[in-house]
Amino acid sequence: MIPCPVCGDSEAVRAVATLHREHVESRNLTDLARYLAPPRVQVRLPDPSYADRQETHVLLPSLVLSFLIGVAVAFMGYGFGGFLIATLPCALLGLLAAKLFAAARYEAARDEALAAAQGEERSPAHRKRQQQWEQAVYCPRDDIVSLAGGIIQLSPAQFHDIMTGRIGTEDESDEPATGHGL
């Protein structure tokens, strides 16, 4: 095992993957276990109001159309009763069509988000983060995670930010990652 770059102790240093697996198997999900979790791609699903907005595209025109049909029926001599008999079924059909349209649009947006997440999982950046996670070691004495054989030293929170893609390492982006050894 690689010795800790700060304290030099090689007995306390543990592989991040092993440490995380032990925490998960023992159901001891501490903040440290969450920080040392393997890289995962976040699926960016559309927010629930997306369906409501899509529904509005069909619902408002269908309600206007059902109202106009009701007015036309009322003027043809059927009066207010004819207006209600024509308007209510048309409005209900419009509502059903709007719900179905919104559900289909939300499902399409959801499928697109899932496909984008799967594509991101196959990306070189995600594979690199996976390799970094597998090679990372943690020293509990100094509370640091070492990457690249001890060259890069990070706090567990900074390590989590790299693994989630919030920040990149120096060779991955132009912005330098902040850490003990940088």
Image (spheres, rainbow, N blue to C red):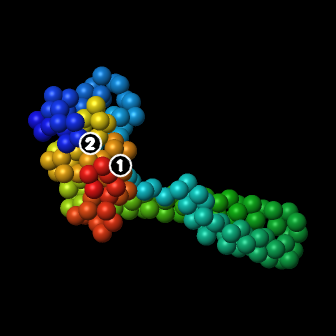
Q: Is residue 16 depicted above or below 51 in this figure?
A: above
Instruction: Tell me the crowding category of disc 1: few under 14, some 14 to 19, or many 20 or more residues within 10 angstroms, Cα based.
Output: some
Image point (29%, 40%), residue name: 144
Depth order, front residue of 85/139:
139
Q: Is residue 123 above or below residue 145?
A: below
Lateral position of residue 114 relative to residue 130, left or right:
right
Mark 2: which amino acid? Val
Q: Amino acid at mark 1?
A: Gln
Q: Is residue 81 visible?
A: yes
Q: Nearer the viewer, residue 150 or 101?
A: 150
Rendering coords of residue 98 (x, y %):
60, 62
Name the image quarter holding the N terminus.
top left
Q: Is residue 159 visible?
A: no
Residue carrying label 2: 145
Say whether marks 1 and 2 touch (CB < 8 Å).
yes
Residue placed furthest toward the front: 7
**Of 46 and 40, the residue lying toward us:** 40
Q: Nearer the viewer, residue 76 or 117?
A: 117
Taking the view exactly as shown, the residue that stands out farthest to the top is 26
If the image is split into quadrants, where does the C terminus sit?
bottom left
**Residue ID at (37%, 56%):** 166
Q: Residue 145: x, y in percent? A: 26, 42
Q: How far apart in space, not on screen, are marks 1 and 2 (Cα)?
A: 9 Å
Count the numbered circles shown.
2
Q: x, y (%) of residue 54?
A: 57, 65
Residue that protrudes farthest toward the left in the picture: 1
Q: Earlier in the sequence, mark 1 or mark 2?
A: 2
Q: Which residue is mark 1?
A: 158
Dot 1: element? helix
| Quarter location, residue 89 | bottom right
User: Which element carries disc 2, helix, strand or loop?
Assistant: strand
Q: Is residue 17 left or right of residue 168?
A: left
